[in-house]
Image (cartoon, rainbow, N blue to C red):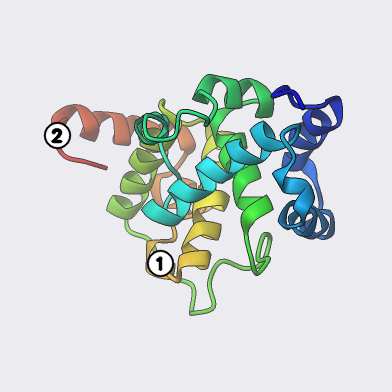
Amino acid sequence: MTDRPSAGAHVIVQLVAVLDERTCQQLRALLRDDVATRDTLKPAVYSLAGIATLIDTLGCVPTIEEYEHARTEHPAWPHHSSLGRRYGSWLSAVNAAVKVTNDPPSWGTPARTQPQRTYSRADCVRAIKRAKRAIGDWPDQREYALWQCIEADICRRTGALDRTPPSQSAVRKRLRSWPDALELARRLARSTPTQSP
């Protein structure tokens, strides 16, 4: 057998990010089966497994730097840029890993089983800074919304519901608009560059 993934494996990997929950469940079952050990599927499965391992270890969306650091111990994991090309972006690759490896399935279910919390301005700024750290740049509204969904799902998976970040609409309501929220987060980041998000 060769080390090159089959055309079918490439198709599966590219479609994971847009699959419905039932199909993801079926794919999880397939990957648990012995077919997951075939060399032709190894690169696709391993790329998601690496991200999933970091999610389970860190309890949050892993940054590119965290992934690359872990990759030094797991050289078979693909480079983050390969994942970005395969899935469209780093965040989309993380999203695919969460969807495929989430067991029991909870994607798309309400993030909170407790009363909805009210977020302060500081909570919103911290969340934007966390998203920036995970994404590698200041997020636009779409990127933040995707990051928030992924992070909320990870919080649900780990039971850390108190770490669930505010939704994009909650940030906009608290800080007037998305541009205002980003400007405040940037200004505070410049004034306290040594503090972590």
Question: In the picture shown, does residue 194 fall above or below 85?
Answer: below
User: Which is in the foreground here, disc 1 or disc 2?
Assistant: 2
Q: Secondary structure at mark 2?
A: loop
Q: Residue at x 46, y 66 (%)?
A: 158
Q: Choose between 125 and 93: the one closer to the eye.
A: 93
Q: Choose between 2 and 7: the one closer to the eye.
A: 2
Q: Residue at x 70, y 45 (%)?
A: 37
Q: Amino acid at mark 1?
A: Thr
Quarter of the image where one finds residue 186: top left
Q: Which mark is residue 118?
A: 1
State the residue position of label 2.
192
Task: Report if the CB atoms under discs 1 and 2 are less than 8 Å apart.
Answer: no
Q: Position of residue 109 (x, y in %)?
A: 66, 67
Q: Position of residue 118 (x, y in %)?
A: 40, 66
Residue 162 horizontal side relative to residue 50, left or right: left
Q: Choose between 163 and 73: the one closer to the eye.
A: 73
**The furthest residue to the bottom:** 114
Graded by Cα atoms within 10 Å as few (under 14), some (14 to 19) or many (20 or more), the crowding at tag 2 reads: few
Residue 89 horizontal side relative to residue 60, left or right: right
Quarter of the image where one finds residue 49: top right
Residue 33 horizontal side relative to residue 167, left or right: right
Q: Position of residue 84 (x, y in %)?
A: 59, 24
Classify the position of the C terminus by image quarter.
top left
- Is residue 59 visible to the viewer in this orientation of the structure? no
Question: In the picture shown, does residue 179 fall above or below 52?
Answer: above
Question: In the picture shown, does residue 184 fall above or below 122?
Answer: above
Q: Amino acid at mark 2?
A: Thr
**Earlier sequence position, callout 1 versus callout 2:** 1
